Amino acid sequence: MGQLKTLHAVAPAAADAAVEQRPVQLAINNVSLRFPKPDGGEFTALENICMEVREQEFAVIVGPSGCGKSSLLYLTAGLNHPTEGSIEVAGKTVTAPGPDRGMVFQGYTLFPWLTVRENIEFGLKRKKVGAAERQDIVAHYLKEVGLENFADNYPKQLSGGMKQRVAIARALANDPQILLMDEPFGALDSQTRLQMQQLLLRVWEHSKKTVVFVTHDIDEAILLGDRVFVMGARPGHIREIIDVDISHPRTLEMAMEPEFIALKRRVMNLLHDDLEAMH
Amino acid sequence: MAQKRGVLSACLSPREELPRQLILSTGVIGWALVILAWVVLAAADVVPDMFLPSPWEVFQAGQRLAADGTLMNHIWASFEVVVIGFVISSVVAVPLGLMMGSFRIVQAFLEPLVNFVRYLPVTSFVPLFILWIGIGLEQRITVIIFGVFFQQLVMVADIARGVSKDLMQAAYTLGSNRRDVMVHVIAPASLPGVLDTLRVTIGWAWTYLVVAELVAASSGLGYISLKAMRGFQVDVIFLAIVIIGLLGLVTDQFFRFLRTRLGAWAN
């Protein structure tokens, strides 16, 4: 476990400083994304997006379907390229996908021919991490997501929630600079989703990774986020950035507090305006 | 569930599982009916003896040929040709097919060629091969390769093309380079489909073997079959057919076994 500490220690001096004083981990600078249309015109998916996410911040992007929130995440991952503008992660301009930006996808993307353990090891093997160290890291993250007893199971033997837990462990095991999550709980039933939100909060409070989390679920956005970026559609743009001043550790009960409900109303109104503008 | 609803109801329900015993005995009954029909037809003298030997006569022919070792020699000759031809074809077709399914440029280069050659009847090339290569082992191996390779290539390319892009993207975000994606995602993801392809195409290899041996060979099951026709030994023709069927069954089971061992995750 000693090796683990050095590998995954994330408690720099700035840990307790206010979010605004921490270094910028993700900078999205005037990013636009356009596609040619079959009729010769152009479709604008994202228009002039600017946003900054600071170290150890949990940023949530919420917006109606089709507002380009997932596209923005794919651009950050390097899986697609912006038509204009640039994206920087930890000061480096994104040009291609890389292990510094871990991603958890909406669909199940575990490698079905690998066991849970081998899935979590996948990135470590690409980085040529030694077997002993791999084993420590896998054990650590299996424990974090509560799947110690499923190390040698294959993905098809797991429930949807368990698969996404492995996907989270797999992304974190790589020790990325930033964790990108694209509606990771979208396909789960509501009970499981609540459990997963709790689990993610706990894991995040341990690891203090910078997270960018995309969702269309307002409760999920406020429960998880330090800041919520509310997006509008046609073309995709950022409408408002909402600070969530609810202390950590957060629990599901907080969703009943008046300040939570006030925030929820605000986000709802923003999304609702957007819907009306569309009709 | 099936027990409660009754076996008959289970038999009539789509996709319903049945007790293993029932499945085995039904398979045995299928075989028994075919052999019974054969025995009855042979005994009833509907068809002259010369054209339809009884199963017992075929068995005796088998014993006769096995006694002096010629049967084993012919079986081995055929088996050797199939295995060599099939292995050479597969060793090239599988990696090339994976490339063809993964890289648009390889597909653009190969597809027009392959789709032309693929529809040419292999049999039409046999005279050409005999002129070029002669009537030895190499000629028969070439016929098998020619018959199997292009089909394998297209089938494997389709399988590689079907590998989920999400898995590839996940691999990239975990630090894979393009080579890693080929080796650690596309290849393993394609494995079950590739084994299925091999299982199907080895059946075709047996077919082309007989074609090759009927035209030009001095050994093998197709050759003894042709020789038997000239000597009106219908029992030997039947024997050759039965043995080819059994060998096909064995190779099929081999790939089925590999598939269940190596591709269990996909079931």
Image: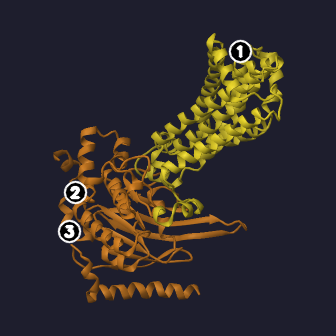
Chain colours: A orange, B yellow
Query: Which mark is on residue A17?
Result: 3
The chain under label 1 reads B
Query: Which mark is on residue B6?
Result: none
Q: Amino acid at mark 3?
A: Ala
* Residue ID at (63%, 10%): B68
Q: Which residue is mark 1?
A: B219
* Residue ID at (30%, 70%): A195
- Figure label count: 3
Image-based side of A52 in relation to B55, left or right? left
Q: Amino acid at mark 1?
A: Ser
Q: Residue A116 location in percent, x, y?
A: 35, 51
Q: Residue B67 location in percent, x, y?
A: 62, 12
Q: Residue B107 location in percent, x, y?
A: 67, 42
* Same chain? Circles 2 and 3: yes
N-term-proximal mark, 2 vs 3: 2
Q: Amino acid at mark 2?
A: Val
Question: Between residues B221 and A174, which one lies in front from this camera angle?
Answer: B221
Q: Secondary structure at mark 2?
A: loop
